[in-house]
Amino acid sequence: MNTTSLKEKILREVDNITQELFELAKKLKENPEIGFKEYQASEWITEILEKYSFEVEKNIGGLETAFKGTLKLGAGGPKVAFLCEYDALPEVGHGCGHNLIAAASLGAAISLSRIKGLNTEIIVFGCPGEENGGGKVILVEKGLFDGVDIAMMVHPSTENCVYSTSLALDAYEFEFKGRSSHAAGAPEKGINALDAVIHFFNGINSLRQYLREDVRIHGIISEGGKAPNVIPDRAVAKFYFRAKDREYLNEVTEKIFNVAKGAATMVGAKVEWRKFELSNDDLKPNKTLAETFERNLRFLGVSDIVSPKEGRGSTDMGNVSQVVPAIHPHLSIGDKSLIPHSREFAQATMSVNGKKFINLAAKTMALTALDVLTDEELFEKIKKEFMKDYD
């Protein structure tokens, strides 16, 4: 099999559909929908998949706006998954560039599907709610990634970074319950839930010095009472807890729970906690797959690639990387002055650089998948690395 000619065909196929993909990204940008309510977005994306002969299954994993597009080539072979994100941020819109992610993953899948002689199953996963709930967490838990051999997506950024990790994340709401009373007339009869929350914050701040440097803790008081002259019988705090790996984060959250119980005990209150978002596991990219992606990126003329680095944020792609060899590279759509999660970033997705991102990301993912499908030794190396990492 002449891989050079196949790669050239992939490049032509991506070029042929780039304008169509950019128009999709534009529609998503102009009609932003928040997580798990991306009804129009999922409809537009699946319409394109069906146009290019993908078999589409909607409402997967019990999620109304999730989907799975499948196209089989030949018999057997590795299953390759490209992941779409398409949820927007409240008020900001597509300030994280998920409209570009969806378009690029579509482009990679469609161009690869035009290559004859391959033995594979190409899968496009529609993954809702990355920003506010972790759709991929649910899809992983429901077994949708079982049997998938490699998974990838590319995120817009202000730099080109092929290999970066992310932090594991837990999101907890703590509800402290006390007893209301007149703050001046009968303070001795009250139990101040807000005081318990304040002790909780102070306790966490005291705990920080005993935690690893990679731990990040940030929270707010979402409810602290209604009037100054009424002792609050209910106060609520929301926190994100992050750490470099899931195992250590579990230790941190247990310490936090003890701090919460201690804070409640100090004032005689009670405390309960619950997750208000699904937990993200740490992203662990497959190095061999990332190196393959980088070779193809350089083949396409990109040389300004930053060194591998540890990420500070979190993503539900981390959960995918725990069950299948996966990568989550970043490609630039602007310089460092462009701030992610801003209206300016959303507007930048409609720039010339945004269109170039779709073209480049789609090409690089498709070429990387082609390498895996045509090089059995490479595929085995990817699998062995993954198994070694999770033994």
Image: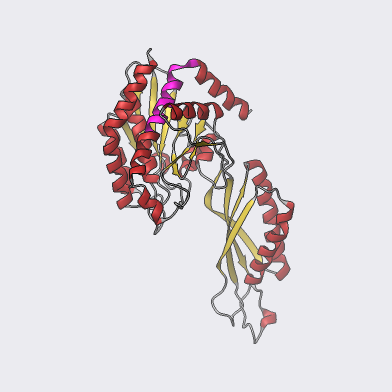
* Residue 374 is a magenta residue: yes
Identified at 42% across, 46% down, the residue is 334
At which x and y percent is residue 341?
45, 53
At which x and y percent is residue 171?
56, 53
Residue bounds of the magenta highlight:
362-376
Q: Is residue 93 left or right of residue 188?
A: left
Q: Which of the colour schemes (rainbow, by chain, secondary structure, one colour) is used?
A: secondary structure
* Residue 109 is a magenta residue: no
At which x and y percent is residue 190?
66, 77
At which x and y percent is residue 246?
62, 42
Can you say which quadrant of the picture contains the C terminus?
A: top right
* Observer able to see residue 64: no
On screen, residue 167 above or below 379: below
* Observer able to see residue 330: yes
- Between 342 and 59, the one nearer to me in the picture: 342
Query: Splitting the image into 4 quarters, where does residue 126 fall?
Result: top left
On screen, residue 316 above or below 5: below
Identified at 57% across, 63% down, the residue is 220
- The extreme left residue here reads 51
Count of picture labels: 0
Give the dominant element type of the magenta stretch: helix, strand or loop. helix
Can you say which quadrant of the picture contains the N terminus?
A: top left
Identified at 73% across, 68% down, the residue is 266
On screen, residue 147 above or below 377: below
- Between 188 and 209, the one nearer to me in the picture: 209
Q: Is residue 146 left or right of residue 363?
A: right
- The extreme bottom residue here reads 185
On screen, residue 219 above or below 17: below
- Between 202 and 95, the one nearer to me in the picture: 95
